[in-house]
Image: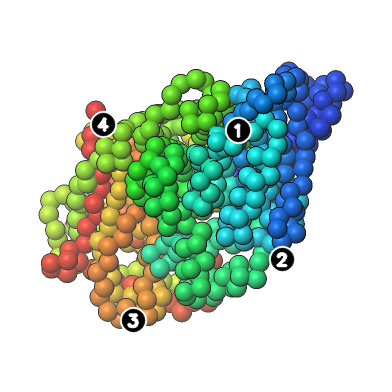
Amino acid sequence: METPFELGSEELARLEAIREALLDPSPRRIGRLDQWGLADTYETYAEIARYSEVSLTMADGTVLDASLSVPRGLAPGQTCPAVVLPAPLINIGHRAYLGMLPRWALGGYVVLAYSQRGLAKSTGEIHVAGPQDVADASAVIDWLIQQDGVDSGRIGFFGSSYGAGTSLLAAAKDPRIKTVAGTSAWADLFASLYENGTRHLKAFEALVQLFGEDRCSQEFREVIQKIRANTIDDQVAEFAAQRSPKNYLDAYNDAATPILVTTAWHETIFSVPAVIDFHNKLTGPKTLLVQVGDHGNAELPGLVGLLSKPTEMAYRWMDHHLGGSAGDGATPQFDVRSEYMFNLLSDVRHATWDDYALPKKRFHLAAALAGERDGQLSEDGPEAGWTRSVKATGKGTDIVVAPKLVQTGLAERMGLPHVYKTGEADRGLAAVFTTTQLRESSRVRGELELRLTVRPQQADATIVAYLLDHDPRTDKAHIITHAPYTFTAEHTGQAVTVTIPLQPADYAVPKGHQLQLVIDTHDPLFAPENTTTPVSTIDITSPTGSESCLDIPLHPID
């Protein structure tokens, strides 16, 4: 399973050794951690906090598997801030957070981590952060505030991925949650499943496999089958709407709930534009972090006890809003913070997204010059009257969003982005448009938009647009951004002009490189390969008055 939370045998052995040392902080148990250099850390933890595993019974009899960490030596009546950690989507559930406990304990927090219903060792069925999970979060708080040392007025939620969504949705309903930090969060579940009429099937099936279909609720199983059948009806839309934080903006804004969310430029699980739009519409204290990589890549080191930008920001966020001291003591900045591709050491900050995003420049799609096989991306002016035809065969070129879910993004964080050889792409399957070589190093930063006129010859035809950074000397290219678009049956045989927002980006393009727009007809992220599909033609055109163009926020690097 390609997931940021799939742990290998060594990682699982380390977590189990940590758990045993927490439950039995004897010299023998803590000494075992020395092989990972963790003995001192957890010896200190045992001196300042105590750990226990608990079972929380919900009103319907569902039992949530949980753990509790409480500071030692509290005076009578002394209380502490509390942080609740709903689990990410992983088969060890809340134990994924064991590596964070020493920092929370040093900061003086009570910590309650739990696995949502149906996940890991919790009983019940998976509802995907639905109303039952939100009610469970409130019941967890009810139990927590009955424990010694908990300040009921200083409760925050932190979660990664599934835990982030659970945290945000719970905060919309329970005013006792004073602040939220969500890493690899989602804001619009529908947009994450169904982008521009196109299903994200590969990511969806990976999530279903990770949930365990046999553990899913009847409602969720019905939605699973409808998405597989491409029956995106009111039931699917309502299921997603209930689970989308963007639909609870009034609750967050009325309460001025401080919210920190993080995402990644090449996120393949959840919609990045939706997270950015959600952040922009919040009116309370807020911070957005966008990083190099894919879902969960950036925070994973922090979850296992190492340093990561998302978890360090989360500690600082909770300290500021709840009064603990887990972070570095600095005041968090309420802004937009990012890394540019593919430099994970970069740190770019702006007050707002509007300050951050660069103005767009229009590049017109034009016919190929004499002797050239690829079309042009030109700033000279619109060009009408040309047509490029590509074949839809159920199999595309080797240019894809991500050869491997999550793992491709992880390689990006290590400075090893996937290399595409666009010169080898079959021009019968993809149309390519290229700029001239850039005269100076430039930055793509912000939102991009493509306007095309397309004539599909078959119902439900899909195109996928990719923007790449291409080095003409080596024919090596790296992906900057992308977007799919699927045409409905009524579009068959008709010329349809569509505007397609591409995922926002922050990318430094070296001098002498070109920008390449590749328009393909298939990507395994959106549909499995299907060589039995009847071959059809998709015409890409540029009629007068609706000339095809691509708006790119491209400007020289200062």
First reached walking from the N terminus: tag 1 or tag 4? 1
Locate residue 459 relative to residue 120 in the image: left or right. Answer: left
Q: Which mark is residue 214?
A: 2
Image spot of residue 348 (x, y percent): 36, 30
Q: Name the kind of residue labelled 4 in the image.
A: Ile
Measure the C-alpha gap from mark 3 to mark 1: 59 Å
Depth check, mark 3 against mark 1: the one in front is: 1
Q: Can residue 508 be seen at all in this image of the molecule?
A: yes
Q: Are marks 3 and 1 in contact (CB under 8 Å)?
A: no
Q: Secondary structure at mark 4?
A: loop
Mark 4 crowdedness (10 Å alpha carbons): few <14, some 14-19, many ≥20: few
Mark 1 crowdedness (10 Å alpha carbons): few <14, some 14-19, many ≥20: many
Q: Name the kind of residue labelled 1 in the image.
A: Asp
Locate residue 420 relative to residue 127 in the image: left or right. Answer: left
**According to the image, label 1 marks what residue?**
151
**62 vs 108: above or below:** below
Q: Name the kind of residue labelled 2 in the image.
A: Asp
First reached walking from the N terminus: tag 3 or tag 4? 3
Measure the C-alpha gap from mark 2 to mark 3: 37 Å
Q: Which mark is residue 557?
A: 4
Q: Secondary structure at mark 1?
A: strand
Which residue is more in the foreground, 243 or 258?
Answer: 258
